[in-house]
Amino acid sequence: MTTQQLGTARATRFTTRLALLCTGLLAGTFGYGAVNLVTTFNVVPLDVRLTFHSALMRVNGPVVQTTMALAVIGSIALAVLTRGGARRAAAAASALVVTSFLVTRFGNVPINGLIKQWAVTTPPADHAEVLRRWEAFNLVRTLTALAAFVLVVWIATRSRPGAPDGQKASAIGVSPEISS
């Protein structure tokens, strides 16, 4: 193996691990929110939900934005470093993370702004419908983040055709490159 191939193999392993970590964190964050937070939001009094939701968004904003950015960077870099099916899967994972970002930015964030206002004033008569829209956007971004994570897991764990003893992809095993 040449020095260049070794460098590419190391970069691919690192990038696969980065994409795996960040897409996993994103899917986990949104998944936890969809299963636990939204369920809790729906059983507490409205004023408690609005207050907690507003406080949560202040903390979540920088964390989720950073995680999304790293997930996009990692999956795009993975698409650049791989070939064949892995490249297509990494590109699809990138598109899914970008979709999660766009849904968050243009769906959830504007409603978060309304929720902040409602927490210090009075919610409008149609607040339940607006909150249902927030939950629908939340479900979409959760599912797209989960799908991106599944694709990166597939890239990281799939067997390489023709590799001895069913070696795994470079992020997990010892084979230097992911190819199809």
Image (tube, rainbow, N blue to C red):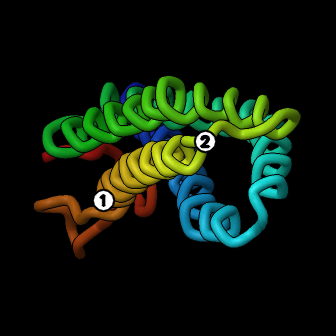
Q: In the image, is residue 73 above or below residue 157?
A: above
Residue sitting nearer the eye, 169 or 87? 87
Name the spot of residue 45 as percent of width and height, x first: 78, 64
Look at mark 1 in the image and give the residue it sits on.
Answer: 154
- Ranked by sequence position, the earlier of labels 1 and 2 is 2
Crowding near the residue tagged with mark 1, few <14, some 14–19, many ≥20 C-alpha atoms within 10 Å: some
Residue 47 shown left or right of residue 108 in the figure: right
Q: Residue at x 29, y 67 (%)?
A: 167
Q: Tell me if 18 is positioned left or right of 113 in this view.
A: left
105 sits to left or right of 118: left
Residue 135, relative to residue 115: is it above or below?
Answer: below
Measured in 3D between alpha carbons, the distance from the residue under mark 1 to the one under mark 2, in whole angstroms, is: 46 Å
Mark 2 residue element: loop
| Amino acid on which the number 2 mark rests in the picture | Ala
Q: Residue at x 41, y 29 (%)?
A: 98
Q: Give the labeled residue for mark 2.
A: 125
Vertical position of residue 86 compared to residue 58: above or below:
below
Q: Residue furthest bottom?
A: 165
